């Protein structure tokens, strides 16, 4: 699913929010060569004893990020495995199923069959898995393993393609729990339960965030595989414009993002574990342009949806 180009960015600029900051660019990678993105396989190839605590958290989180595919409308996107009161579920972007044209409720039938492919983060153009080269049949069986999703995702209640970032999320429940299944022998954490990604206990206004997932530009240049990147984030605060939560629940990131990165995990590390701070949902390239250094104004960075509205909506 391509990254949505946010009309919200235009609203922000028109309101003078972006203009309130200097637009002098910082000389760091942003829509340039994706040089800061690194394949997960590079971490998996390292001796486990040499991994830092953060690298272990990244690889553990990658086991909990998969791909959702909606049958019938031929749409797919990243999906983040979470647990809600004992039930496994996945979070993805709402624009995955949003209408392709104004006036249509959804582009995909809410009751359409959908599957969660749990091992897709191991996709690699050379078929490499933890230093072991598998046969074609083994690769296919491993990568195509999936769990059906229950129809009727949560938060598919509004129509149209225009939505604020804080509204851009869906939750599907799995037809069966997956998180307690052990990871296969050639995967990171072999023999250990897959687990789920927890919500964070804190939501810092700014700081470090990690993006994990596929990226369209990286794929075109290097082949289809999952990558990770460390970058900066600034979280929306207050009530947003006109009292709305949709902008307040936005995360601005200077990670490399190109179409195809939608729903990638935005994680923060707490006590050695990657937590679900948010997910990638858009970019501001219509304002800032592609192949340019990072603007100093965070409101012109790439855009994510905070997990805060999801946590609020799903709280008991």
Image (spheres, rainbow, N blue to C red):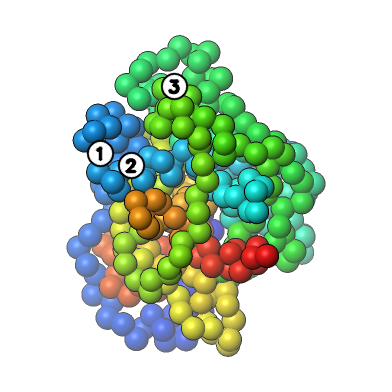
Closer-to-camera residue (79/184): 184
**From this viewpoint, is residue 12 visible?**
yes
Question: Is the C terminus in the top left, top right, bottom left or bottom right quadrant?
Answer: bottom right
Question: In the rendered image, which residue does mark 2 sit on?
Answer: 56
Q: CA distance from mark 3 to mark 1?
A: 19 Å
Q: Residues within 10 Å of mark 2 (few under 14, many from 20)?
A: many
Residue 250, percent from left and from top: 49, 70
Q: Are marks 1 and 2 in contact (CB under 8 Å)?
A: yes
Q: Is residue 166 left or right of residue 9?
A: right
Secondary structure under the numbered disc 2 in the rendered image: helix
Q: Position of residue 39 (x, y in %)?
A: 33, 38
User: Is 197 in front, or is 34?
Assistant: 197
Looking at the image, is mark 3 or mark 2 earlier in the sequence? 2
Tell me the distance, in whole angstroms, between the alpha carbons under discs 3 and 2: 17 Å
Name the secondary structure under disc 3: loop
Residue that mark 1 sits on: 51
Residue in the picture at 50% in, 50% down: 197
How far across and down, in percent of the image, does residue 179 sit?
57, 39
Q: Which mark is residue 185?
A: 3
Q: Which mark is residue 15?
A: none
Give the total number of marks visible in the rendering.
3
Q: At x 48% / y 56%, what residue is drawn? A: 276
Crowd tier of the residue under label 3, counting other residues whose Cα lies within 10 Å: few below 14, some 14–19, many 20 or above: few
Residue 26 image point, x, y percent: 22, 67
- Between the C-alphas of marks 1 and 2, the distance is 6 Å
The tag earlier along the polypeptide, 1 or 2, is: 1
Residue beneath the point at 29% across and 69% down: 295
| Disc 1, SS | loop
Q: Is residue 9 above or below residue 1?
A: below
């Amino acid at each position: 699913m391509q990254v949505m180009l946010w009309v919200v960015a235009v609203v922000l600029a028109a309101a003078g929010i972006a203009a309130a900051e200097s637009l002098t660019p910082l000389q760091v990678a942003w829509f340039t060569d994706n040089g800061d993105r690194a394949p997960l396989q590079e971490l998996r190839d390292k001796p486990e004893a040499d991994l830092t605590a953060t690298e272990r958290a990244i690889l553990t989180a990658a086991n909990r990020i998969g791909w959702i595919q909606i049958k019938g409308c031929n749409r797919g996107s990243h999906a983040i495995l979470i647990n809600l009161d004992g039930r496994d579920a996945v979070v993805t972007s709402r624009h995955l199923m949003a209408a392709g044209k104004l006036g249509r409720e959804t582009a995909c039938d809410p009751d359409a069959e959908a599957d969660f492919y749990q091992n897709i983060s191991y996709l690699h153009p050379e078929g490499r898995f933890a230093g072991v080269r598998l046969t074609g049949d083994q690769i296919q069986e491993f990568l195509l393993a999936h769990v059906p999703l229950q129809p009727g995702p949560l938060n598919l209640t509004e129509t149209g393609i225009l939505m604020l970032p804080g509204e851009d999320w869906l939750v599907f429940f799995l037809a069966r729990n997956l998180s307690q299944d052990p990871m296969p022998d050639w995967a990171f954490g072999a023999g250990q339960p897959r687990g789920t990604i927890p919500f964070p206990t804190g939501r810092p206004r700014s700081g470090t965030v990690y993006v994990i997932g596929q990226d369209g530009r990286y794929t075109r240049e290097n082949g289809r595989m999952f990558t990770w990147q460390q970058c900066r984030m600034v979280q929306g605060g207050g009530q947003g414009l006109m009292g709305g939560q949709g902008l307040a629940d936005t995360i601005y990131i200077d990670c490399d993002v190109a179409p195809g990165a939608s729903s990638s995990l935005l994680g923060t590390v707490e006590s050695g574990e990657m937590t679900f701070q948010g997910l990638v949902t858009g970019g501001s390239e219509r304002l800032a342009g592609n192949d340019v250094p990072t603007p100093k104004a965070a409101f012109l960075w790439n855009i994510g949806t905070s997990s805060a509205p999801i946590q609020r909506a799903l709280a008991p």
